Amino acid sequence: MSRRSLQAAVLLMAGVAAGCATVGPDCTRPDVEVSDAFRGQAAGDAASASIADETWTNVFADEPLRGLIAAALARNYDLRIAASRVLQARAQYGITRSNQFPSIDAEVGAQGQRTSIGTSDDEARTIGVARIGASASWDVDFWGRFRRATEAARAEILATEWGRRAVMTSVVSDVASGYYQLLALDLELEIATRTLATREESLRITRIREAGGATSLVDVRQAEQLVSGARAAIIDLQRRIEQQENFLSLLLGDNPGPIPRGGSLTDQRRPPEVPAGLPSALLARRPDIQQAEQLLVAANADIGAARAAYFPQVTLTGSGGAASTALSALFTGPAAAWTAAATALQPIFNAGRVRSGVELARARQEEAAAAYQLVIKSAFREVADALVAYRRAREFRDTQQQLVASAQDARRLADLRYQGGAASYLEVLDSDTRLFAAELDLAEAQRDEVQAFVEIYRALGGGWRE
């Protein structure tokens, strides 16, 4: 190929590429109604900063809990899977983007052949041919099919990255919630152990009274029932504690084992009011909303890639090299050869395949748009649910504390009445059972309060900032 011919071919390719168009609609966000404040948000809180803007190290003060979260972020299997998906999306982007550029291949070959005309070795001939050359092929992206596909692949990268951050948010909240559940079980075990000690002492005294004739054997059997009930509760709590530790170990990416503790459940910091911030800021903070938006961008770009199949597919090909039967003449002028070609392929009839492909891409875009709107509405609901749960959990915990105080006094009075002969042991049995249940309910109320706080942090999109 002469220099002038090569320059003309390059100019032709550049001109074709410069005139390329891009078909398909540009992506626009669906309209979503956003209120001025979350339902259940404290008055005057809408303009304040959100707690989700804080890193998890500032939100959770318990040092062992911080260590557990850090370990989970480093070893959790769901996070490792999400990180792998990001790498896959990046590799797929590289594959898709490469379609926009020419592909060039090199070829080196040699061939030998021996022919025998007669039966004598003098009449046999050996022929050898050596070849060296290169070929290039370029599917010109005249209608933007590959550019739209690259746009979709780029959006897929961002979607998987936001998906990884969404997993981070879930891991942080799951570890914190699981840790508080473990502390609640520890508190219930402490209550059950203390109750067992009290009931065993009551059983000892009742046996002494029965031996002295001051009471009947029925009272002894009722006291034994209280002791057995406390022991059964302890056994069940020990089972639940070990299973909760196994659950947390899985979140940490470890084999089942013990989990370190810090302060007790009642020592965990719980602000009276949690700033939620503006609902509009939630759209930029929640990773799952950002992920849904990027999936919408990818689905929209796929429409353009599908519509490009209506138009001609332009392909430029060329090859050049040398071939000779003698190596010494391989690089001489007569041995050189080249070819160049341009083709355009226009679909005429394919039984509606292209049209169906466009309709499929458009339907997927509509699905992605609806999913984007649903994620936003679900996020608003989760925040509202978490805010009301935290407020009501605090109110319930206050009420439960009053109930425990009343149950403790009732248990004391029932014991005094029994000791004075003014009441049967059945009254002691009933008041003791009520006190034990009230104390366990208070522990669960304290757990629900701190877990509602964790849920607010997660629902607002906190936990993925490092």
Image (spheres, grey):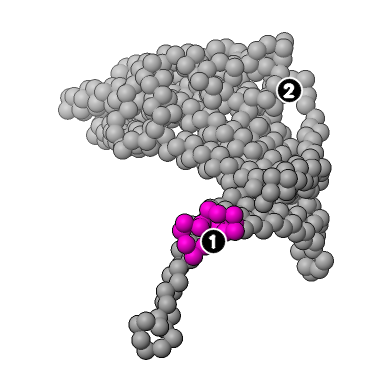
Question: Residue drawn at (54%, 25%), measured in percent from left and top?
Answer: 464
Question: Residue drawn at (52%, 62%), measured in percent from left and top?
Answer: 324
The numbered dot on residue 236 is none
Q: Residue 24, how many percent across, how many down?
A: 80, 45
Q: Is residue 181 visible?
A: no
Question: Residue drawn at (53%, 53%), measured in percent from left and top?
Answer: 331
Quadrant of the image occupied by residue 285: top right
Q: Is residue 375 above or below residue 185?
A: below
Quadrant of the image occupied by residue 33: top right
Q: Amino acid at mark 1?
A: Ala
Q: CA distance from mark 1 to mark 2?
A: 69 Å
Is residue 326 magenta-colored? yes
Mark 2 = which residue? 280
Q: Amino acid at mark 2?
A: Ser
Mark 1 = which residue? 323
State the SS at label 2: helix
Task: Count every numbered label the image shows and give the total.
Answer: 2
Q: Is residue 175 left or right of residue 169?
A: left
State the SS at label 1: strand
Question: Residue drawn at (56%, 15%), measured in percent from left and top?
Answer: 54
Magenta part of the protein: which range? 321-336
Of residues 365 and 214, the one drawn nearer to the viewer in this rendering = 365
Q: Is residue 105 above or below residue 286?
A: below
Q: Residue 306, how many percent across, how many down?
A: 75, 53
Q: Is residue 32 visible?
A: yes
Q: Is residue 256 above or below residue 338?
A: above
Q: Residue 109, how many percent across, how many down?
A: 47, 61
Q: Is residue 434 left or right of residue 168?
A: left
